[in-house]
Structures are given as structure tokens and as C-alpha cells.
Image: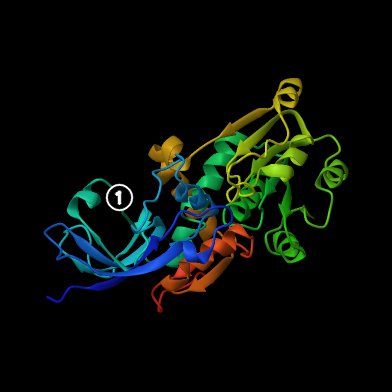
Amino acid sequence: MEKIKVKKVILARRPHGALKKEDFAIKEDKLGEPQPGDVIAETLFLGIDAGLRALMNEEPSFAPNYKLNEVLFGQGIGRVIMSKNDQLKEGDIIFAPSYPWQTAVHFTADQIKEGKIKKVDASIPPSLYVSTLGNNGLTAYFGLLDIGQPKEGETVIVSAAAGGVGQVVGQIAKIKGCKVIGIVGTDRKLRFIKEDLGFDDGINYRAENVEAKLQKLCPTGANVFFDNVAGDVGDSVLKNLSLHARYICCGAVSAYNKQPRDDIGLRPQFILIERGIKMQGFIIFRDYGDRLDEGLKQLTEWYREGKLKHKETVIEGIENVGQAMVDILSGKNIGKLVVRVAADAQVAP
């Protein structure tokens, strides 16, 4: 059998400062012959996440760093096109949280036994598994409900509210009966979170004073803050949190392109002590790896009930993964940013 030719996305150089598309390159290769228990999958979508920027540095991060001139990885969804595994057949849809960024992937029997890939419901648009029903939705679900523990009637603030995680956080908070305020970077995103997602209010941090606006929107302080941004936005919200508020540290997109990370900003200790605020970070697969099925079940139920809306910004072609990473760090996306690799892959409506 002729070997399958693939295109791979590799890290061509370590980025310094702002990420550039030239930091990435496309490498052509061929897949090996599948052995008993193996499968080959055609890649449908890749999920682009701002946090992956941290893995491009040499400094240790939340996951193994990317290696120079080797294929990158992140959320991915594929369709089995060749199978020598009894549990998977051609046409099955599979998800991997660490999916190699290439046009087709050879998964070994050992990887399948170790649970590195998961068969998912083919009746659901596959792009949702790298967005609302994937790492982003699970991050929103466990971060908000397990750490934030929102109660009916409380006020929840979410930064990067129009992104892949933020759009889910706000909607779960509404399901739980909370008042939700989203912080975004454009008026278009502001309209999206209020008109499409049902947020109660929002702030365009580029056009408004976040601290002053929050004092008007929640004069007694907010109860929960789901932070995807950190930096000045995070500092402003922290000053407007209530007694015994919960501050969920999910991301720090404002700092990912900074080297070295010398922007100290607000020292929060006195505020945390005086108001009894809980501030906690988390990594979804490290801290909730044994509960992912629980989260996926509930997210899927809410999706089928029409309680979770979603939006995706789609970039076409694996050759444009580098540009997609640049775009997400500059906030050009609304909703989840995905790269469609297979031309016939179905985007969620």
C-alpha cells in the first residue's frame, strides 16, 4: 500500500515577544503502515487556544513544551479512514486533547489503549468537540462550578467573554441563575455576548474604564470572577469583588506574548485577606482528568436542550494554523477559533 502523505505544522523557531506566523512552518511527511490495533484518521478540525503560546517558550509551563522542528499538538478531531482496531471502524469520529497538528494521523494500538483518543457522537457537528464540548467547555464547566461555585442571584464576571471558554462560562452562569457581566475588547463582541448569548451586561475594556463601570454595574461587588486575561483587566475586577468572592485563574492572555514576564501589576494579598477572597488556578486535565466524562455528559445535555449557544470563527487550511495562533492572541476571533483541515468537515450551525 502506498503510504499516506501528510502536512505537519512544526515550530520553526522560538518566538520572542509577539507571536509571528513565521514562527511556524509546514513539513511534508508520510505515515507508517498501520499495525494490528492501529487506526489512521483524517483530521477534520484543530482547536486553537491562546494558552498554547506558553508551550512555545523554553521555560517550563503547564504541559510539555513544544520542541523545535517537531509537530505541534492541541485539541483535534478526526475521522477514521483506516482501521485495524476492533473498537473503531472507518467513519468513526475521534477526539484527542493532544492531537498532532497534521492532515492525517496514525494512532497506535498503545495510544488507543491508554485513552489518548476518544470516540465521540458522530451525530454532533465535529467542530463542537474542539470548542463547546471539548477542552474549552470542560474548562468553563469545572472552573466555574467547582472552584467558583456560583449561587442563584450572585454576580459573575468573565473576561475574554466572547472567546471559546468565556462564551460557555457566561451561559452556564445564566443556567445557574446568576447575573453575568462580560468583559470584551470590541463593540461587536459586546453585542454578541448581550444579544446572542444573553449576558446581562458587558464592558469594552478598550473604550471604557473597567473599574468605574463595574462600580456602577455591581456597587456591592461581584461574587465570582472567571479570569482568562489577567493584567490590568484582572486588577480592575479584583478591586470590585465582594466579601468571600471566588477568583478563578484560568488564563493570562494579556501576558502570553511578553518576555520576560516582568509586568508585576497589582499585589493582591491585602485585598484577598481583607475580603476573604479565594483565588485559585487550575489545569483541566491535571485537576479534573478523572471527571471529564461527567462534564461532557452535562455539556452535551445542555447543548441538546438548546441552553448552550456557540459561535466559531473558522480559518481554512492547515497552512494557516500559524496565522490562527497570531489572530487568537490579538483577539480577532469571536467565539471559538478553529482551523478546518478537511474541506468537507461540517461546521456547527
From this viewpoint, is residue 347 visible?
yes
Q: In the rendered view, does 270 fall on the left or right side of 62? A: right
* Above or below for 189 versus 260: below
Res 74 quadrant in image: bottom left
Q: Secondary structure at mark 1?
A: loop
* Above or below for 137 versus 325: above
Residue 160 spot, x, y in % from top left? 66, 52
**Residue that label 1 marks:** 116
From this viewpoint, is residue 154 visible?
no
Q: Can you say which quadrant of the picture contains the N terminus?
A: bottom left
In the picture as drawn, the residue positioned furthest to the bottom comes out as 343
Residue 38 spot, x, y in % from top left? 18, 59
Residue 325 spot, x, y in % from top left? 52, 61
Q: Can you say which quadrant of the picture contains the C terminus?
A: bottom right
Q: In the rendered view, does 42 fall on the left or right side of 347? A: left
Q: Nearer the viewer, residue 91 or 110?
A: 110
Res 95 quadrant in image: bottom left
Q: Nearer the viewer, residue 195 or 99?
A: 99
| Residue type marked 1 | Lys
Q: What colour scheme governs how the chains and residues are painted in the rendered image of this protein?
A: rainbow
Residue 200 spot, x, y in % from top left? 77, 53
Residue ID at (19%, 49%): 110
